[in-house]
Image: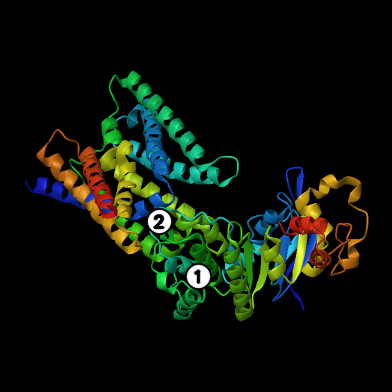
Amino acid sequence: MLAMLDSSFNAYTATAAMAVSCAILSVFVVARRWAFMGEGISHSGFGGAGTAWMLMVAFPSLAHSEGLPYLFVTLFCFGTAVAIGWLASGRRVTSDTAIGIFLVASLAWGFIGQNVYTAKYHATPAGFDNLLFGQMRAVSGAYMKSSVAVALAVIATAVLLGKELIAYCVDPLLARTSGVRTTFIHYTLMVLLALVIVTGIRIVGSVLVTALLVLPAASANLISRRLSIVVGLSVVVAMIGAWGGLLVSEVYRAVPAGSAIVLVMFVVFLAALAMAKLRRV
Amino acid sequence: MPALIDIQNLEFSYGREPALCGITLPVEAGTTLGLIGPNGGGKTTLIQLLLGLLKPQQGTIEIAGLTPRKAVSRGDLIGYLPQKPKLSTAFPLDLRRLVTLGLAGKTGMLRSHSKEDLAFVDELIDRVGLTKIAHRPVHDVSGGQLQRALIARALAPRPRVLVLDEPTTGVDSVGQRDFVHLIQALKADLGLTLVLVSHDLRAVTAISDRVACLNVHLHYHDTPKHLPADVVYDLFGCDVAAMGPAVGVGDAKAVSCCSHTHQPLIPTRTQEDLLAADERGSEEDKNDLRIAFF
């Protein structure tokens, strides 16, 4: 009973922390039109897992290592975030092209890894479904603490580098010509995105994690055009989605938590859209 | 008076395509340089070099003794008004915050803006006539109001140099007149050195102390009243490079300002001549005037 309470506490705390991180970052992601960027980074995690599965085939002693896929998911997410930024910084490859390239290459590599593993061990790799669609049951204390640490890192960065982040997201060229170190700010955002996505993949999976980086700010922007209100509303929307989704998943056990979280946020977005339309009328 | 912006023997090319050749162009402190020339003549490249967005392949640019990159990174030396700012439409931002963003580089990371700088932001917002709508979202204001906010943004860190890229493009005649008045007043009050890039010769001649005509080479650098109509015709009516033997005849140094050489042209009639002719009612010269001004 105590273990269940502990797990429940961990799950609600971890989702709350993730909701706050995603909500704050979503304001910048939506402003920079980086929804596709989130998609590219999160799907690269699948390529990381594929690498781990191939290593498990090459080194059978690693076959039952639970942490190996997540280690490589993390490495690939960070690597892809930095690589997209680097490739898109030149004049020859645009940002969306760079994202598209890494997205499809990671997926292809991940599927090869999964098939090689399945061919060797005649079973789907452990955690395959969780990687794609998330898993909220049996959330560990360590994961909960990591989520809180990531949330604190996002909040601290937003407070300490707020003016630079805003200047960069409003217009990178104007920011650069005003003396803002835009390259540093760009990679800081990329690293934060990768951190939040790696955390979010555990909860909602690599397929759906982008939703958490888009829906909060997209909903809030429909209701207000004031920065402080938009940030506050984004956090509220993300919290409603996170805890609402968890509750739905607990009541209806067949509903995965990740999908429930995303769909609750989507319903909030529709409500915000209706409210915005009604106010115009 | 020493040059605040000192461009010496500047060369830049995109691959094998030269964009700027042998440009030597000093800009004295407190003056306004009008930069004119045809599309593809190198104006935008020169602006990008001045802003440190490109590096000179040969020659040097110094702004107050610093390379452009160092000058820009200080945050309080150069202000920039882009032709078409690509402001994110999805970011919740009011005019006052937009203007305040101009201080980000000057203030520096992990620091808060000083009270004096924030007071100056409010003063600038007042100067450009936006106090009543300072808290309005940037996407709910007109193009003219947004431009004034961007001027205030560029001036927020009290820069010594203000670079204006095609500021009157798409602005009606009343707006152009208001813009000229505003810029002249701000220049006088803040002691600015201006670099104005424009196709609009009325704006250039109204504001500039000197005009530089660029078409890969520097073709003219002098006061606007000496600007030969032929130069204007060559630069805007047709491509100077395509003029062939016509270019190279005559000696532009006769009307040049300084010791460095300019690409020679055929100075014949100045705008003053054309204006005088216009008053005499010559239809031919009226046509020339239209070419000269537009």
Q: Is residue A22 left or right of residue B126?
A: left
Tell me where residue A185 appears, x and y as whole percent.
48, 57
The label on residue B91 is: 2
| Mark 1 residue crowding within 10 angstroms, few (<14) / some (14–19) / many (20+) | many
Q: Amino acid at mark 2?
A: Phe
Tell me where residue B145 appears, x and y as whole percent.
49, 65
Q: Residue drawn at (79%, 67%), measured in percent from left and top? A: B279
Tell me where residue B88 appears, x and y as whole percent.
45, 54
**In front here: A40 or B147?**
B147
* Quadrant of the image containing the C terminus of chain B: bottom right
Tag 1 secondary structure: helix
Q: CA distance from mark 1 to mark 2?
A: 18 Å
* Residue that mark 1 sits on: B103
Chain letter for mark 1: B
Q: Residue drawn at (62%, 70%), measured in percent from left and top? A: B180
**In front here: A76 or A237?**
A237
Q: Quadrant of residue B10?
A: bottom right
Tell me where residue A45 appears, x and y as whole percent.
38, 37
Q: Is residue B229 left or right of residue A240?
A: right
Which badge, 1 or 2, is on the more N-terminal residue?
Answer: 2
